[in-house]
C-alpha cells in the first residue's frame, strides 16, 4: 500500500504544513482573518487558490467572528470548510465557536497558540486553546510540523464521521511550530483520497431544497435541549475510539501513525513517566533517551487529544508507574497549577494502589523555551520525590 | 434513554410545516388606487413581508400575509396606497 517514493519532501514551517494538509483535504470554503502567528497560513491558502491548485472559495471576512460564522453557513449547506486563528482572534469568535459545536458542524480550525493578554505579548503559549477546552470541540495538540499536516487530514475524517459530527481544533504553539521550519513529507493526493472521501459522499443533514430542514431550531421545552447536550457528550466519548480507528487506517495507507489519543514513548517498562503536550515533546524524547542511557527507567507519554480527555488510554498507560511529572505550558487559575495536572489528578483514584506520585511543572509560559535542562530538572525532581524528598506539588520551572 | 428528536443535533424536518397567516394580525390594510399607481415597484421592494403582488396595471397586497405595517403607503412616490382601518 505504501507509495512513499512519490512523496515530496520539503522544509517548511508549521503554517505551511497546515496549508498543505488543507490543500490535500480539498475544502470548499475557507475564511481566515490574519493574526500573528497564523497569518502566513491564510496567505499560503490564497496562493494555492490563485495558482489553481485548490478549487475552494476564499471569503475574506472583516474579523474572526465573521470568519467562523461564514463557515457555519457553508457547513450547514454541506460544504467542507477551514479556518484558523490565534489568541484574541479566538476570543473574538467565541459565540460562533460555541454555536458551531452545539449545532454539530464538522468544521476544522487550527489554532496557532499564543498567550492571552494581559500582560501583553505576541508570544507562544497554550492558554488560548486551553481556555476553550470545554466548549464542545474536539482538540488535538501537535508536536511537529509533520504531525500538524497529518492531523489536519485526520481531523476531517473524525469531524465528518456520521457517528461523530463535531468540529475539530488542531492546536500548535505559535512561533515554535507556526514559524519553525522542519522537514515535512507531503503525502500524495492519491494517498489522501484513499483515506478521506469527498464531502459529496457524506449523507449528513444539510440545508437544501430537496429535503427542507430547519437548522439550529428552538428547543422548547428544555428536555429537548438536554437531549441535544446528552447526544453531544456521547459523540465526544465516541470520538475517542474513533480516533484510534482513524489512526490505524492512517497507518495502513501512509505507513506511519501517531498512536491515537496518546503516544507512549519508552514508557512501557518505566517507573517514572513525564507527560507532555505540544512542541516540547520532541525535546523531551531526547532527554528521556539520555536518561535511559544513564540507566534510569523513565518514559514519556504525549497527550495528542486533550478533548475529549483520553482517560481510558491514560489509566492503562499509567498502570504500575511510581511517579508522574506533568509539564504544563498553561495555567489553571483555580488551583495555581496546569490544566494537564488537574486532569491527571482526577484519574489517580482509578489506578490501583499504590497510587503514583503526581508532580506538576509550569514551563514555557510567555514564549519562553522549554529547554533540555528544564526537562532534566523535571525528571530529577520527580525521582527525588520518589526517593522521599519533599517536593512541592507544583514547580514553576523558570522561577525556581 | 427516551429521545424526542431523531437527529443528533438541533435540526428538524420542515415537512410538517405550520402555515401561519400573518394577515390575521392586521388592523389596517393597504388599498391601491388603481388609476394612480405608476407600476414603479417601490412598494414591492420595500414590503418587509414580501407580500406585494404584481397585477394588471398596478400592485396590490396579498392579504393572507400582509400585516398592515404601512411601509408601502409611506414610500409610494405616487401616493397611490391608502391605509384603511380593518373595521371601516
Image (spheres, rainbow, N blue to C red):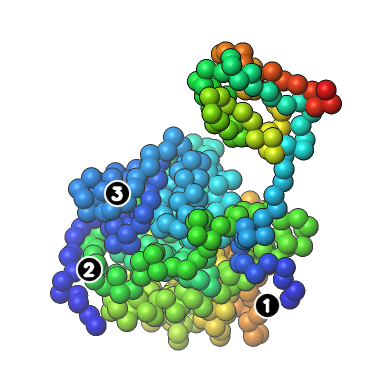
- Pick out the residue farthest to the right: B87
Q: Give the numbered dot on residue A45.
A: 3
Q: Nearer the viewer, residue A361 or A59?
A: A59
Q: Give the numbered dot on residue A188.
A: 2
Instruction: Answer yes or no: are tags 3 and 1 on the same subunit.
Output: yes
Indicate the secondary structure of the residue bearing disc 2: loop
Mark toward the start of the polypeptide (3 vs 2): 3
Instruction: Answer yes or no: are tags 3 and 2 on the same subunit.
Output: yes
Mark toward the start of the polypeptide (1 vs 2): 2
Q: Chain of mark 3?
A: A
C-alpha distance separating marks 3 and 1: 47 Å
Question: Horizontally, is A62 left or right of A94 in the view?
Answer: left
Q: Nearer the viewer, residue A50 or B62?
A: B62
Q: Residue at x 59, y 45 (%)?
A: A95
Q: Chain of mark 1?
A: A
Q: Residue at x 62, y 16 (%)?
A: B80
Q: Residue at x 69, y 49 (%)?
A: B19
Q: Which residue is mark 1?
A: A349
Amino acid at each position: 500500500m505504501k507509495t512513499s517514493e512519490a512523496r515530496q519532501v520539503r522544509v517548511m514551517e508549521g503554517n505551511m504544513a497546515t496549508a498543505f494538509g488543507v490543500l490535500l483535504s480539498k475544502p470548499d470554503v475557507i475564511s481566515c482573518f490574519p493574526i500573528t502567528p497564523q497569518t502566513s497560513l491564510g496567505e499560503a491558502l490564497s496562493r494555492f487558490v490563485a495558482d489553481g491548485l485548490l478549487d475552494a472559495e476564499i471569503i475574506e471576512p472583516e474579523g474572526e467572528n465573521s470568519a467562523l460564522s461564514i463557515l457555519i453557513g457553508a457547513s450547514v449547506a454541506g460544504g467542507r470548510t477551514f479556518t484558523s486563528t490565534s489568541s484574541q482572534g479566538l476570543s473574538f469568535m467565541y459565540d460562533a465557536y460555541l454555536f458551531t459545536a452545539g449545532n454539530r458542524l464538522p468544521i476544522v480550525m487550527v489554532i496557532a497558540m499564543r498567550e492571552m493578554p494581559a500582560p501583553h505579548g505576541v508570544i507562544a503559549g497554550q492558554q488560548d486553546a486551553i481556555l476553550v477546552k470545554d466548549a464542545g470541540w474536539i482538540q488535538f495538540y501537535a508536536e511537529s510540523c509533520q504531525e500538524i499536516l497529518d492531523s489536519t487530514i485526520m481531523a476531517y475524517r473524525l469531524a465528518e464521521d456520521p457517528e461523530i459530527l463535531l468540529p475539530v481544533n488542531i492546536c500548535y504553539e505559535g512561533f515554535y511550530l507556526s514559524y519553525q521550519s522542519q522537514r515535512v513529507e507531503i503525502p500524495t493526493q492519491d494517498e489522501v483520497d484513499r483515506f478521506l472521501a469527498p464531502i459529496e459522499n457524506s449523507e449528513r443533514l444539510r440545508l437544501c431544497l430537496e429535503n427542507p430542514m430547519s437548522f439550529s431550531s428552538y428547543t422548547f421545552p428544555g428536555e429537548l435541549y438536554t437531549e441535544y447536550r446528552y447526544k453531544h457528550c456521547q459523540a465526544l466519548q465516541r470520538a475517542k475510539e474513533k480516533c484510534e480507528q482513524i489512526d490505524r487506517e492512517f497507518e495502513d495507507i501512509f505507513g506511519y501513525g501517531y498512536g491515537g489519543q496518546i503516544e507512549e514513548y519508552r514508557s512501557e517498562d518505566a517507573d517514572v513517566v513525564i507527560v507532555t503536550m505540544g512542541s516540547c515533546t520532541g525535546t523531551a524524547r531526547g532527554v528521556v533517551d539520555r536518561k535511559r542511557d544513564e540507566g534510569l527507567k523513565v518514559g514519556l507519554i504525549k497527550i495528542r487529544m486533550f478533548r475529549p480527555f483520553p482517560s481510558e488510554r491514560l489509566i492503562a498507560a499509567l498502570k504500575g508507574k511510581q511517579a508522574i511529572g506533568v509539564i504544563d505550558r498553561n495555567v489553571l487559575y483555580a488551583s495555581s497549577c496546569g490544566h494537564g495536572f488537574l486532569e491527571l489528578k482526577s484519574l489517580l483514584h482509578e489506578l490501583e494502589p499504590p497510587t503514583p506520585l503526581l508532580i506538576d511543572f509550569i514551563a514555557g509560559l510567555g514564549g519562553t523555551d522549554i529547554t533540555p535542562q528544564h526537562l532534566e530538572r523535571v525528571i530529577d525532581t520527580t525521582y527525588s520525590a520518589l526517593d522521599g524528598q519533599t517536593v512541592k506539588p507544583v514547580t514553576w520551572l523558570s522561577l525556581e | 434513554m427516551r429521545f424526542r428528536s431523531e437527529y443528533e443535533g438541533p435540526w428538524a424536518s420542515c415537512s410538517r410545516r405550520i402555515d401561519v397567516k400573518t394577515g390575521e394580525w392586521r388592523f389596517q390594510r393597504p388599498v391601491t388606487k388603481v388609476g394612480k399607481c405608476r407600476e414603479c415597484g417601490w412598494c414591492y421592494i420595500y414590503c418587509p413581508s414580501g407580500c406585494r403582488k404584481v397585477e394588471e396595471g398596478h400592485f396590490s397586497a396579498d392579504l393572507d400575509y400582509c400585516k398592515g405595517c404601512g411601509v408601502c403607503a409611506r414610500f409610494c412616490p405616487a401616493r397611490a396606497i391608502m391605509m384603511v382601518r380593518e373595521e371601516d
